Amino acid sequence: MAVGDAPRTPRRAAAPLRTAAWRGLRREIERCERCPLAGTRTHAVVYRGGERPTVVWIGEAPGRAEDLAGRPFVGASGRRLDRAIADLGLGPEEFGIVNLVKCRPPANRLPRASVVACRPYLERQLHLLDPRFVITLGRHALSELVPGAGPITRVAGCELVWNGRPLVPLLHPAAILHNPVLAPRWADDLRRLGRVLDRVLRQTL
Ligand code: SF4
């Protein structure tokens, strides 16, 4: 979809967030003690977005603002992400946001063991949400979803495949905040993403 264009997505019958399976999964995550991050979290951070998302964004882990709010991407990175979502023309019901890891890692360093321990929750979320299109944010989310895809700096903005559906990796919004020289690359990747999204969503009408 060209940046700024209105979305064209048909509605689906099921509303995953209203199912008993989703509510049970949320409760399980909120009580989870599978890894040491359970001991330092304020809130487990499960999901933000619509009940029938066409597009699911996958980040890495909650930061401080997310840990306090219990919602993904609500800090400075989230504001950048929300601008990108608006520029792509995705309405509030058309996207969802999840993370690889549901609890905040101390010092924002992502422990590999926690990624592994938390992976089944991500799988179950994606199974229930069943998005048509997936976007990963940052190198960790990319390497988890498409192992062997190559360095994020090389493939950001390119169309890849995950479980038979299109996936486009992007740099993590936090990387743009920490390194503003990457802002033009971010904008360019978003334009490429918009074109892929437009083509894919038109094909499914
Ligand atoms: S990060 Fe995932 S596996 Fe670890 S305690 Fe939180 S929900 Fe459980």
Image: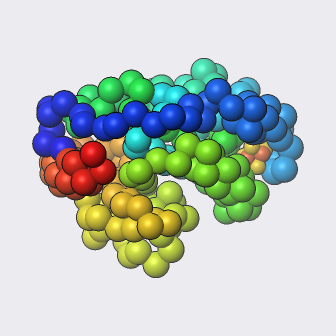
Residue at 46 percent of width and 78 percent of height? 148
x, y (%) of residue 136?
43, 53
Indicate left or right for 84 with 76 as reference.
left
x, y (%) of residue 77?
40, 34
Compared with 170, 178 (above or below) is: above
x, y (%) of residue 187?
18, 45
Q: Residue furthest top?
A: 69
Quarter of the image where one finds residue 43: top right
Residue 174 visible in the shown view: no
Residue at 67 percent of width and 50 percent of height? 124
Compared with 128, 110 (above or below) is: below
Q: Residue furthest bottom?
A: 148
Residue 139 or 12: which is nearer the viewer?
12
x, y (%) of residue 36?
82, 48
Residue 205 or 199: which is nearer the viewer?
205
Indicate left or right for 8 with 163 as reference.
left
Which of the image's four quarters has the C terminus? top left
